[in-house]
Image (spheres, rainbow, N blue to C red):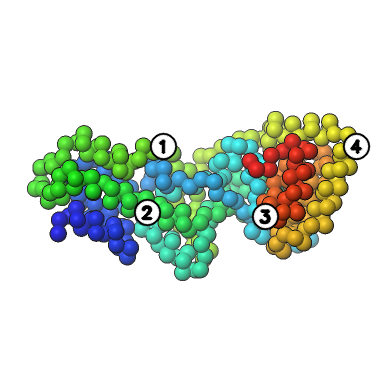
Amino acid sequence: MSLLREIQDATTTPDFRLADVLRKAKILAARLDHQAFKEWIEKELNGYGTDDELPQYRTLTNLGSRGDFFGSFGRGVKNAPIPLLSFPQELAETLSKVNVVMSVSAIENTVAQANQAGGSILRALWTADAVALYGSDVYEHMNCGQAWRDIPTSSFIAILDAVRNSILDFVLEIEAEAPEAGEVKPGTKPIPDPTLTQIFNQCVLHQNNHTASNGYQIITDLQQELIMSDNRSTNINAGRDAIGNVGGDNSGSISNTLSQQTDAEINEILKLIESLHQKIEAISPENQDVAADSLETLEAEVVTPTKPAKLKSALFALWSVGKDVAIFANALSAIAERLGIHLHG
């Protein structure tokens, strides 16, 4: 069987490890003598460096965040949602993204460990600086002990599938151009470089945008840590104003909205908040403490505003834990509408 057919068979055999498929592709890359294809295979086999550009399929976006929070007198809540929409946009985008630089073997092992543990969610930790600077801005009277991004195991599986499909597409195009390309003698170029580059760009790069990698850790529910990168260059001070508030001008607009409310309108908002207190039991038990604390913060900020960001954070926290309960979500939406806040992003 020719090398091209061996690679095709390997990519379509579910039990064939992707790392072994890449090693076969590495032989093909040497015979084709195409530098870009060689480098891509090496990085997929050995992992990407902190200064390397990443293919688009290795950047995971729109990830939700959760954390463990602790207060006085032993109060606390674990695995609580963190409403990133109340954060400055640039910071929220950074904290909802992970760049996966691990080798395909490490990704395969991580997926296998997660499956053995019976879990489908992996974790990408926030940096210690991010937790320290923003951990006290999420829930009133509580500090964050640790925070992380939730990564579905399916996202890692999608990376493996993207690599496998790219190899298959590349090999099929090579076979269509030169069926014996995998069997050529050393020093022979079966396909001109311009043609190879065109095939590589089409099948592997897919005209993707590249993003420089940032540093994060992945830990499974078994708490086994896998270092993805050590580069922690993110400026997490983005979005704080001169007195340390989060949100800047956007939060200021909330203050303006509150100051323009009549006493009757404020009372209507407080009635809606009271109705939410009575509906707490409708949401899941593990989120009821979060909802109660957030309601207290929301009520206090409506009566006596201090930091607009606290009001906004409380609203988004409530939306995170109660949006799937219709009677809870409707009251929240009514409050947000009166305050000029868009809960849906």
Q: Earlier in the sequence, mark 4 or mark 3?
A: 4
Left or right: where does residue 237 sit relative to residue 123?
right
User: Where on the picture, by quarter, is residue 68?
Assistant: bottom right
The span from disc 2 to disc 3 (Cα, nearest Å) is: 32 Å
Residue placed most toward the observer, 73 or 93: 93
- Crowding near the residue tagged with mark 1, few <14, some 14–19, many ≥20 C-alpha atoms within 10 Å: few
- Inspect the image, locate mark 1, and give the three-letter code of the amino acid beneath it: Asn
Residue placed most toward the observer, 39 or 130: 39
Secondary structure beneath dot 2 equals helix
Does the image show residue 132? no
Q: Earlier in the sequence, mark 4 or mark 1?
A: 1
Q: Earlier in the sequence, mark 1 or mark 2?
A: 2
Cβ–Cβ under 8 Å for marks 3 and 1: no
Residue at 28% x, 48% y is: 169
The span from disc 1 to disc 2 (Cα, nearest Å) is: 19 Å
Secondary structure beneath dot 1 equals loop
User: Where on the picture, by quarter, is residue 156?
Assistant: bottom left
Judged by depth in the image, the label closer to the viewer, 4 or 3, is 3
Residue at 63% x, 45% y is: 84
Q: Which residue is mark 2?
A: 161
Residue at 27% x, 41% y is: 200
Q: Earlier in the sequence, mark 3 or mark 1?
A: 1
The span from disc 4 to disc 2 (Cα, nearest Å) is: 58 Å
Judged by depth in the image, the label closer to the viewer, 1 or 2, is 2
